[in-house]
C-alpha cells in the first residue's frame, strides 16, 4: 500500500552554510511524498507521483509545507513539568527547581506519566525525534524508551550520571553509573528506533573517577552516543576550573577521560577557548545550540555563524526545561535573534536545516531522520504557513518560499502544525488517534 501526502516541499540538496543558503533547497510548489511501509520511497511533483502511484491513498495538505519532522538534539524530559520556572541562573536553577523535580523520578509511575506527556507535547509541536537526558534512576530511562516505542519515535536517551555536587538521593557512584548505563545500553541501544547516549550530566556533578568509568564504557561501545553539557555559563566554567585544576580547560575534563569523540553531543558550548574549538572541530563532535535556554537562564550569546565558518558540526535543541519552549520553531526564532546579537542574520534555510538534517547529522542518524530522501523513515511534519492572522497577513506578501516560511519560523507555534507523521502513521488531532500501548 502506498500513501501519498500532498503539499509544498522544500528539499535540501546542499548544506545551507555555503555562500548561497537560499539555493541549498529545491522548492516544489505542488509536491508529494510517497510512503510505503513507513518509509519515504519518492518525493517530487504531485501530478507525476499520482500518475506513478494511481492506487495510492492520498492525504492532501493543501498549501501546507511538508518537511522532515523536527529533530531536537538536546532536552531533559524530566524537566517538562517545571518548564518556565522563574528567576534563577544555572547553578541555583539546578538546585532550586531541577534537582527536586528530578528526585520525583524515583517513582517509575511518575516517570512514565512525564515521558508520555513530553513525547505528546513534542509531537504536537512537530518534533518527531528527541535526544533526552533522563534522571539518575534507571527506570526513568526505561520509561522514556517505552513511551517512544509506543509512539514509534526514534529517540536518543541515557541515564544521567552524577556522583557529587547533587543531593544525596540523586547521586550514584562511578561503579553504579557504569553498571547501570551498561545494562541500559544493552537493553535499549538499537532496539527498534531507540539509541543510547552515555550521559554524564556535566563535569561539576561527576568525579574524575566517574568520567573515567563512562569514558571506558564509551570506548567499549563506540556506536553509542555520548551527551553532556559544556561551557554554558561563565560561573560554571570557573567552577570546573577549581574542580579540575589539572585540566587544560573545560573540554579537557571530558577529553582526558575519553569523553571527546565524533559521536559526542556537547550542549551549549558557548564560552569556549581556542583550544577547545580546535579539538571539537578536529574530532567532529557536535555543538548543540540551545537558544531559548541560553536567553532564559541568562547563559550568553552562542555565535553560531562563527562556529559554522570554522567548520564545527552544529545542531539545534530546545533544552527544555532550561529552554522556555517545546517548539523547534521557537528555537529557530531564538537562534535567529541570538544570531542578530552576534552580528549575523541566519537565513531561514540555515535555521530549518539545523532543526532537521543538521541535528540528524549530529546524532549520526541522517540516513533515517531529518531529510525527505528516499529510504528515510516517513517522519514528516506539515506546516501551515498562515496559522494565525498575524502570520497570514505577512506571509501573503511573500515573494519567494523562504519569505513565506520566515513569519512562521519567527511567530509560529503548535498552531502551525497541520499534520505529523511518525514512520508513516499520522499522529495529530487531524487524524484518528493511533493505537498506543502506554
Ligand atoms: N547543566 C547541567 N545540567 C543542566 C540542565 O539540566 N540544564 C541546563 N540547561 N544546563 C545544565
Ligand atoms: Zn541540558
Image: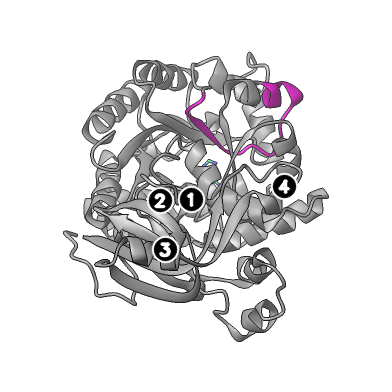
**Mark 2 or 4, nearer chain start:** 2
Q: Is residue 4 above or below residue 307?
A: below
**Mark 2 or 3, nearer chain start:** 3
- Quarter of the figure that contains the N terminus: bottom left
Badge 1: residue crowd in 10 Å (few <14, some 14–19, many ≥20): many
Residue 269 magenta-highlighted: yes
> Residue 93: where, in percent of width, then height?
56, 51
Q: Is mark 4 within 8 Å of ligand 1?
A: no
Question: What label does residue 72 carry, if any?
Answer: 1
How is colour applied across the structure in the image? Answer: one colour
Q: What stretch is highlighted in magenta?
A: 262-278
Q: Name the residue under label 3.
A: 48
> Residue 341: where, in percent of width, then height?
80, 54
**Marks 2,4: beta carbons within 8 A:** no
Badge 3: residue crowd in 10 Å (few <14, some 14–19, many ≥20): few
Looking at the picture, tell me which residue is in the foreground, 226 or 81: 226
- Quarter of the figure that contains the C terminus: bottom left
**Marks 2,3: beta carbons within 8 A:** no
Q: What secondary structure is marked by label 4?
A: loop
The answer to whether residue 125 is visible is no
**Marks 1,4: beta carbons within 8 A:** no
Q: Mark 2 points at which residue?
A: 129
At horizontal 65% and vertical 17% (from top left) the residue drawn is 245
**Marks 1,2: beta carbons within 8 A:** yes
**Mark 1 or 2, nearer chain start:** 1
The Cα atoms of the two marked residues, 1 and 3, are separated by 33 Å
Q: Name the residue under label 4.
A: 300
Residue 69 magenta-highlighted: no
Which label lies toward us, 1 or 4?
1
Q: What secondary structure is marked by label 1?
A: strand
Amino acid at each position: 500500500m502506498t500513501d501519498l501526502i500532498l503539499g509544498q516541499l522544500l528539499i535540501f540538496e546542499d548544506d545551507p552554510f555555503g555562500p548561497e543558503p537560499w539555493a541549498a533547497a529545491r522548492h516544489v510548489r505542488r509536491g508529494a511524498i510517497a510512503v510505503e511501509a513507513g518509509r519515504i520511497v519518492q518525493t517530487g511533483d504531485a501530478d507525476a507521483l499520482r500518475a506513478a502511484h494511481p492506487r495510492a491513498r492520498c492525504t492532501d495538505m493543501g498549501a501546507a509545507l511538508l518537511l522532515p519532522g523536527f529533530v531536537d538534539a538536546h532536552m531533559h524530559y524530566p524537566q517538562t513539568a517545571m518548564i518556565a520556572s522563574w528567576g534563577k541562573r544555572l547553578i541555583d536553577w539546578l538546585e532550586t527547581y531541577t534537582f527536586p523535580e528530578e528526585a520525583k523520578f524515583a517513582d517509575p509511575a511518575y516517570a512514565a506519566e512525564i515521558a508520555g506527556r513530553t513525547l505528546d507535547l513534542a509531537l504536537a509541536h512537530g518534533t518527531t525525534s528527541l535526544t533526552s537526558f533522563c534522571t539518575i534512576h534507571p527506570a526513568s530511562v526505561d520509561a522514556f524508551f517505552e513511551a517512544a516505542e509506543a509512539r514509534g519515535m526514534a529517540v536518543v536517551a541515557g541515564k544521567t550520571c552524577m556522583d557529587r555536587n547533587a543531593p544525596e538521593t540523586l547521586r550514584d557512584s562511578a561503579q553504579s553509573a557504569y553498571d547501570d548505563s551498561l545494562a541500559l545500553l544493552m537493553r535499549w541501544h538499537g532496539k527498534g528506533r531507540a539509541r543510547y547516549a552515555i550521559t554524564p550530566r556535566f563535569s561539576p556533578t561527576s568525579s574524575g573517577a566517574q568520567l573515567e568509568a563512562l569514558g571506558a564504557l564509551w570506548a567499549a561501545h563506540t556506536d553509542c552516543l555520548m551527551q553532556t553539557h559544556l561551557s554554558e555559563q561563565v560561573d560554571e566554567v570557573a567552577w570546573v576550573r577549581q574542580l579540575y585544576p589539572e585540566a587544560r580547560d573545560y573540554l579537557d575534563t571530558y577529553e582526558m577521560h575519553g569523553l571527546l569523540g565524533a559521536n559526542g553531543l556537547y550542549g551549549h558550548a558557548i564560552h569556549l577557548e581556542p583550544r577547545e574549538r580546535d579539538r571539537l572541530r578536529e574530532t567532529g563532535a557536535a555543538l548543540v545550540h540551545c537558544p531559548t535556554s541560553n536567553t532564559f537562564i541568562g547563559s550568553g550569546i552562542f555565535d553560531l555563524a562563527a562556529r559554522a565558518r570554522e567548520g564545527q558540526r552544529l545542531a539545534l535543541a530546545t533544552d527544555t526545561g532550561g529552554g522556555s519552549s517545546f517548539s523547534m520553531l521557537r528555537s529557530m526564532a531564538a537562534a535567529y535573534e541570538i544570531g542578530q546579537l552576534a552580528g549575523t542574520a541566519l537565513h531561514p534555510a540555515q535555521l530549518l536545516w539545523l532543526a532537521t538534517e543538521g541535528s540528524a547529522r549530529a546524532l549520526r542518524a541522517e540516513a533515517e531522520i531529518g531529510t525527505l530522501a528516499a529510504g528515510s523513515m516517513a517522519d514528516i511534519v506539515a506546516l501551515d504557513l498562515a496559522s494565525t492572522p498575524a502570520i497570514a497577513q505577512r506571509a501573503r506578501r511573500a515573494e519567494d518560499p523562504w519569505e513565506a516560511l520566515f513569519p512562521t519560523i519567527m511567530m509560529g507555534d503548535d498552531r502551525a502544525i497541520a499534520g505529523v507523521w511518525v514512520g508513516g502513521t499520522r499522529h495529530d488531532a487531524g487524524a484518528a488517534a493511533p493505537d498506543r500501548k502506554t
